[in-house]
Image (tube, rainbow, N blue to C red):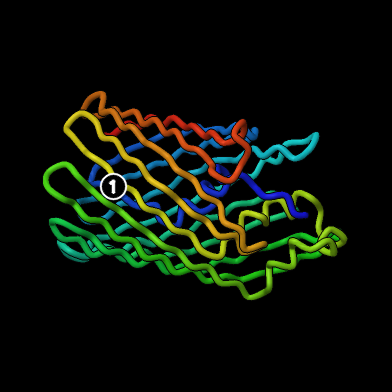
Amino acid sequence: MLKKISLSVMFYFFMVLTAEAASNSSSISLDVGSDEQGNKNTAVAVEIALNSARQIMFGLGGNKVPAGVETINNNFLYFGLSKKLSEDWKVTGMIEYSDLKDQFSMVSVSIPVRFTQDTYFLEAIPAIRTIDLSTSNNKKLVVSSTILGLKAGWYIGKYFRLIGSAYSYSYSRDVSKLATYQSTRYFNENTLLLSSGLLKRSYNMETGLGFDSFSISAGKNRSISAIDNSNSDYIYTVFDYYLSDSWSLSLLYGEYLNTPADENNYTSVSVSYSF
């Protein structure tokens, strides 16, 4: 049976598709996370405001995934450009690359388009992806994928917010065959492990309260595997504290709902500086 990759790693695999400029200011942030299954994540993100309408984004990071007696080091990087077309419309172009040399690599391109009003926003996130899987005899199996995401948020009163999103993934090949016993004859264990993070659908719902010096959020994520059609549920709480006009600290605590009780926690810490 195909071993499934941790949700903490899946989070970093797919987070870049929805990355966006949060404001017209420039910032740099460092995020470090780990879970009780031994997975560790590190990411650095930079946003630079070119002017009031344009912003560039780039970042890099890595995932360390335990795989028996060894550790897989899977790295990623991304670049994006955001432009306000008007007071209501904004478009962002994103490209992401992640790679485990000679075993598994992905290139994703997305173009989120957002419409914003005073009390709500709507966003469509179309994307395409190319996935290279390396076989045991060093050949490449190429799988193309299309992704459609929809995201919406509502701001109720001065402090309360509610945000939801849904993503659908389709593939040019039947990736569920990677879960069969025969797949172990053609792919090594690391390729199959990273492939287990491929999704069929995903959903997220988050609610939060924002104040002048801090904010708190709580949410739930459900991911449906494209490999074996199983569900993975994840709940989390995020506390953001604004240390000053320039510095902020973010703490996340989450739990996987489909794992043993002694392997279900995930935590991360993020520090950001705005300039």
- The residue at 55%/37% (across/down) is 41
* Callout 1: SS: loop
Residue located at (41% from left, 65% from top):
149
Q: Is residue 101 visible?
A: no
Vertical arrangement, residue 271 with respect to residue 121, above or below: above
Position of the N terminus, as image quadrant, is: bottom right
Residue 99 appears anywhere in the view = yes
Residue at 48% x, 54% y is: 222
Instruction: State left or right for residue 138 relative to residue 73.
Output: right
Q: Which residue is mark 1?
A: 22
Dot 1, crowdedness within 10 Å: few (<14), some or many (≥20)?
A: few
Q: Is residue 61 left or right of residue 88?
A: right
Q: Residue furthest bottom?
A: 172
User: Which quadrant is home to the C terminus?
Assistant: top left
Q: Amino acid at mark 1?
A: Ala
Q: Work out whether residue 55 or residue 3 is closer to the camera in this orientation and state it.
A: 3
**Residue 233 image offset from top left, x and y in percent:** 51, 49
Residue 208 in which image quadrant: top left
